[in-house]
Image (spheres, rainbow, N blue to C red):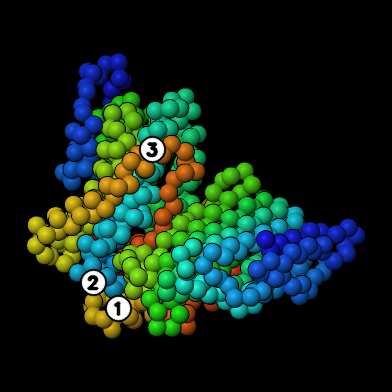
Amino acid sequence: MTTIAVAESPAGRPATVRLTASLLQPRLVSRSAGSAHIALVAGGATLLGGDAVSIKVEVGAGCTLRIEDIGGTVAYPSTGLPSEWTVDVVVGNGGTLVWESFPFVVADRAVVNRRTMVRRGTDSLACLRETLVLGRTGEAGGRIVSSTDIRDFDGKPCFVEELTLDGEQPQPGVLGRARVLDTAIMVGADLAEEDAPASDDRTATREVTSASVADRDQAVADADSGRVLVLARTGAVVRAIGPATHAAHVDATWRRWKNRAERSGQR
Amino acid sequence: MIVSSSVAPARRNASATLAMLLADSRLPAGAHVSSNGLEAGLRRGLAASEVADYMRARMTTVVRVEAGAAVIARHLAAAHPDAVMDHLDVLEAEWAARTPSPALREIALALGAGLARIGQVIWPQTAEVLRPRPMPRPIVLGIIAACAGIGPDDLVRLVAYDDAQTVAAAVLKLEPTDPIHVTSWVLDACATLEGSVSELSKLTSPEALPASGAPLIEDWAEVQSVLPRRLFRA
């Protein structure tokens, strides 16, 4: 298991950081009082069939942790066994986590179970990015079940989702013909006023009336700016769905949310 | 105007009869305002030839969440008569966390209100639970099922059938085609869910509510809510 834990040190000394390497290796980039920046490097060829990657992240009360993936992940064709990718996060009271990740590519015949669990304290912020790509260039892509479960310590849910995607069996209404689903999640901040109106404005310009193939592709490509979904409780999800990572991404919203989270972490 | 249950004549209807009533589009619940995202979907690239697949895709995603919420609400209303509101609050929070689209949460509340109006009059014993505040449609449906006597299997099938028929009625207005064909799509879609009826009908805990998401359905719901010159509200 890969572990990244950051906790406050007494007397304003740099944060205490505990790192354990496994299939993924965490490297300390920098730290200061109450805050750490960690890079996450793949230790070898991941993710092969049967691999089980497990990452545990602990952000101590009042601390700020920034994790940055170095390079994306490819889930390679499975030889029969599915691969597991499990992320278990705890963000203490008043803590902030920003996790900047690269695309997670599900190659043809790969079978992946990906689980992200977040347990959060009061006044905590979690800002996560997940970019799922079905197939390498020219591939339709394999199968992934990606679940996310974000809750308060007392069990109150913020965002719970289980996506089942299969490049061989595209489903209208799920991803349709799109191969990329880029998602950023921000939990712990009230984003209703900041983000909802912008997403409505864009909707008006994105209407497609003809169902020709070209228009359909355009409709998918237009989604690159991302649509913000304001959650019922304390946060939002922004998504872009499209044919390729350069055409469907939520970069602009991600940068805004990330800056906001890092600012609030310095308070 | 609410008749107390001691005065109302004892009425027993079979679960199947009640399910037929609640799935009937002639029921004045206001459900005709929804196309289940079809109108926006067709404008955003869904082909008319894909509508049957769209109905099936809904069965493996949003219908699991809705049917699950109805079944769990039914269980909670029957098992915790004293603290039912607290338990339903927990369920509603789980449902809302699995429904990231505000437009989908809003239409579920609007359709829930339409159904709750009918429920309170026809089954007065539901009024105590349904009156205090608006609840999403699947939870209202579950409460009615508990009071009126709809079994969990029938309840799952009711949600599934209603979901597919909503798309079917909308496609005949948006992309007119042979209504007999469309009817067979409804049965195909319902058959897709049949294998999950037993699993879904056994759900009791709010935390166990399925969370099967559908990013495009959520996206289309947002598009639909601000669609110019639209035929349907959702």
Residue A236 appears in view: no
Q: Is residue A154 left or right of residue B175?
A: right
**Residue on which the image places disc 1:** A216
Sequence-wise, the earlier of marks 3 and 2 is 2
Q: Position of residue B146 (x, y in %)?
A: 34, 30
What type is the residue that disc 2 sits on?
Ala
Image point (46%, 33%), residue name: B85
Quadrant of the image containing the N terminus of chain B? top left
Image point (23%, 18%), residue name: B10
Quadrant of the image containing the C terminus of chain B? bottom left
Q: Position of residue A152 (x, y in %)?
A: 61, 49
Q: Nearer the viewer, residue A70 or A90?
A: A70
- Mark 3 or mark 2, whichever is nearer to me: 3
Q: CA distance from mark 1 to mark 2?
A: 9 Å
**Residue on which the image places disc 2:** B47
User: What mark, if any, has residue B202 been given in the picture?
Assistant: 3
